Image (cartoon, helix red, strand yellow):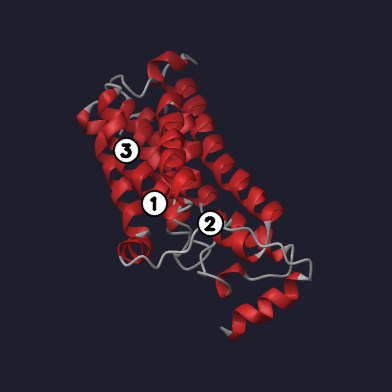
Amino acid sequence: MSVLALATLACMVVSYFVCGIPFGLLAARHDNVDVRKVGSGNIGMTNVARTVGAKAAAATFLGDMGKGLVCMLLSRWVLASVGFNGDWAMLDVRGPFGLFLTLIFACCVLGHVYSPYLHFHGGKGISVGFGAGLGLFWPIGLGMLVVFLAFALPSRYVSLGSVMAAISLPIQCVCWGVSLYAIIPVVVVACCVIWAHRGNIKKLLNHKESKFSVHHDSQGGSDQAGKGGAR
């Protein structure tokens, strides 16, 4: 196995464990709430916003997005240093080594969705996917955000925007000239994110999905935790 392949494998493992860090759970605990026991039970930004508040939701988004972006950028630096004497241009996702980058991208999202710190349960992958997408190839990350906003803002269904962003991901890769081999991990990611939203999709089809809202209760988070545990 080549040094470049070994470095890629190491970056995949590190990215999986770093992106498995549940920032939503940590942000909610600052307000004495176990976000797994309130609302939908998900550790993502949407449930944190509904059950804890805007500040915790913003911290969750920044943490989840940031871990994906940092892991991708650091991985590119490592691979460029190991294999190409620091030449980042050789690691364009549209080039011959694009597969290495999309494998790391996949580990970022899968680490979040199947967190090793939460018995392989986690969030639904959109925030970390956006950050990792920016690190992979910024037009793809930005394109995901545009698609998400185009569907989520008018409908106020975050899940709808998330699913459509996931569907658009491999399509955008094709449009930007990413090789078919390199797109395979991206397709896996898209399917994983859609699968994580399967409950939301069912609710959308049955017109039972909740629209985005932000918790404004000024009382302590412990009260919310108690209410969540009683539900």
Look at mark 2 in the image and give the residue it sits on. Answer: 212
Task: Point out residue 127 in the picture as x, y percentages from the top left corner.
Answer: 50, 45
Q: What kind of element bears circle 1? A: helix
Look at mark 1 in the image and give the residue it sits on. Answer: 160
Is disc 1 surrounded by few (<14), some (14 to 19) or many (20+) residues within 10 Å?
many
Q: In the image, what residue occupies the spot 30% across and 29% down?
A: 173
Compared to residue 103, the image places residue 21 above or below, namely: below
Task: Point out residue 34 in the picture as x, y percentages from the top left corner.
Answer: 63, 71
Question: Which picture quadrant has residue 120?
Answer: bottom left
Is 14 in front, or is 92?
92
Look at mark 3 in the image and give the residue it sits on. Answer: 168
Task: Point out residue 213 in the picture as x, y percentages from the top left corner.
Answer: 58, 58
Tell me the quarter of the image containing the C terminus: bottom right
Compared to residue 187, the image places residue 209 above or below, namely: below
Res. 68 visible in picture: yes
Q: Which mark is residue 15?
A: none
Could you tell me the amino acid type at mark 1? Leu
Is 213 in front, or is 3?
213
Is disc 3 surrounded by few (<14), some (14 to 19) or many (20+) residues within 10 Å?
some
Task: Point out residue 172 in the picture as x, y percentages from the top left corner.
Answer: 31, 30
